[in-house]
Image: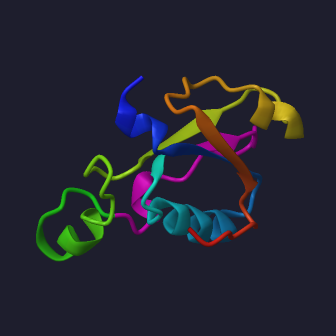
Amino acid sequence: RDYELTMKYTVRMNTFRRNDLLKKTVEHYHSCPHVHEIQVVWSDLANAPPERSFFKLPTNGKGKDAAAANKFPVLGIEPALHFEVHSVDSLNNRFRPILPIETESVFSVDDDLYIPC
């Protein structure tokens, strides 16, 4: 593994029909300097995950988002945001990753838990 990835972690976030909390929490963890990736565990069979535009996230480091885009000093890139869509509604889906996890460390959290960076 890359040395840089040993200094970062993946956030796996469980959510269910609370997009207001999801928005706030994703935006918070996205600003944390050592987050490599945010994987949202989506188990809502009736609704699709929100579009990326739903979240206020820096995109390319140009214009007014330049300062926010530079908050990630270890690799110099923004954390990736992925929705892991499950076909079964279960709280245990957080322990059944579909997406690959590139970091050694994983922070498993619910959408209503806000831990400072």
Which image quarter: residue 83? top right
Residue 19 is situated, as x and y percent measured from the top left of the image, at: 65, 63
Most extreme residue toward the left is 63
The correct choice, above or below, for 30 with respect to 105 in the image is below
Does residue 105 appear to the left or right of 30 in the view shown?
Answer: right
In this picture, residue 75 sits left or right of residue 1: left
Q: Quadrant of the C terminus?
A: bottom right
Q: Quadrant of residue 12?
A: top right
Residue under the image location 87 percent in, 40 percent down: 91
On whether residue 48 falls in the magenta region, the answer is: yes
Examine the rendered structure and indicate whether residue 83 appears above or below residue 63: above
Q: Where is residue 39 shown, x and y percent of the image? A: 58, 42
Q: Is residue 10 above or below residue 95?
A: below
Identify the residue at image location x=39%, y=60%: 53
Q: The magenta stretch spans which residues? A: 37-57
Residue 76 in sight from this viewpoint: yes
Who's the residue at 46% across and 54% down the image?
A: 34
Q: Residue at x 64, y 40 (%)?
A: 106
**Identity of the residue furthest to the front in this view:** 3
Q: Position of residue 32 (x, y in %)?
A: 47, 63
Query: Residue 58 lies in magenta, yes or no?
Result: no
Q: Is residue 90 visible?
A: no
Q: Quadrant of the N terminus?
A: top left
Residue 100, given in percent of the width and then of the height, sits at: 54, 23
Front position in the image: 75 or 90:
75
